[in-house]
Amino acid sequence: MTRPRSRRPRGGKGGSEPRAQIRLREIRVMEQILEGRTQHQIAESLDISQPGVSKITRRMEERLLADVALKVERQRARHTLRLEHMYAESMRAWRGSQEDATRRRQRKAEGGGGAGGTFAELVSENRHGDPRYLEEARKALTDLRKVWGVDAPERLSVQAGMPFSSLTDAALSQELDRQARLLEEHRSNSSVVSTNSQDK
């Protein structure tokens, strides 16, 4: 004989409240939080414990954070699609600007006996492309890197960590001598202190 499957409790007071009632309590907690009431005041007004209010608050905050994170990811996806479209259009326009252009030109020709005529001719020009389209494509790529947070970190100056890098050889030699004298003085002072302490 199979035993009847026990239903899982739904939560709330006693673990058996309907989900709609739990959601209603969450809404009331949120309303009172927005009014600036403390957790103890909320617990008294809703006839629940303060830890219960804390648990409801934490649950709502986690749900809100997950919702915000999802919205941010969707916005990032939308911006990515738009920027990729802008990049593709810029590159298409740049390739179009490289195509050979044909233009019509009129030219006067001198004929014999002072009689001249006007001739129309077609001139084909090779073009290298308009660099402004490449600049727009570069901007789209820069914005894409910002959207995804993959910009390279700022370059650190090596000079900042090396205070003696700007010294000449002579000045550096003097500084080394000075440091050596200071070190020697420190050693001699340390030995005097240790001798005095041993004499005592």
Image: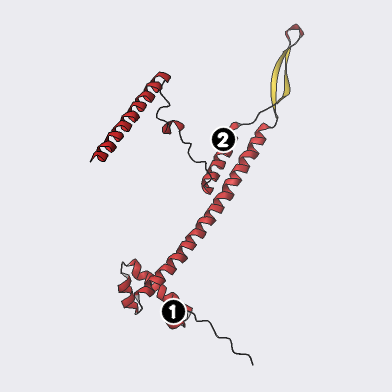
In the picture as drawn, the residue positioned furthest to the right comes out as 112
Q: Specify the quadrant that holds the C terminus.
A: top left
Query: Residue 163, percent across and down?
Result: 40, 30
Q: Is residue 2 above or below residue 114?
A: below
Q: Picture coordinates of residue 122 (x, y %)?
A: 73, 24
Q: Which mark is residue 135?
A: 2
Nearest the viewer among 41 and 94 is 41
Q: Residue furthest left?
A: 200
Q: Tag 2's secondary structure?
A: helix
Three-letter code, disc 2: Glu
Residue nearest the viewer, comparing 151 with 144: 151
Compared to residue 75, the image places residue 14 above or below, namely below
Compared to residue 144, the image places residue 120 above or below, namely above
Q: Describe residue 65's horizontal placement relative to residue 123 as left or right.
A: left
Image marks 2 and 1: residues in contact by CB distance under 8 Å = no
Q: Is residue 26 above or below residue 169?
A: below
Q: Quadrant of the N terminus?
A: bottom right
User: Who's the residue at 41% across and 71% down the image?
Assistant: 55
Marks 2 and 1, the one that precedes in the sequence:
1
Q: Residue 102, percent across and down?
A: 71, 28
What residue is drawn where x is 34% and y is 66%? 34
Residue 143 drawn at (x, y percent):
53, 43
What secondary structure is found at the residue carrying circle 1? Answer: loop
In percent of the image, x 27 and y 34: which residue is there? 192
Amino acid type indicated by mark 1 = Gly
Find disc 1 in the rendering and name its residue: 12
Q: Observer-nearest residue: 116 or 157? A: 157
Mark 2 crowd level (few <14, some 14–19, many ≥20, 10 Å Cα): some
How many angstroms separate mark 2 from mark 1 (CA)?
60 Å
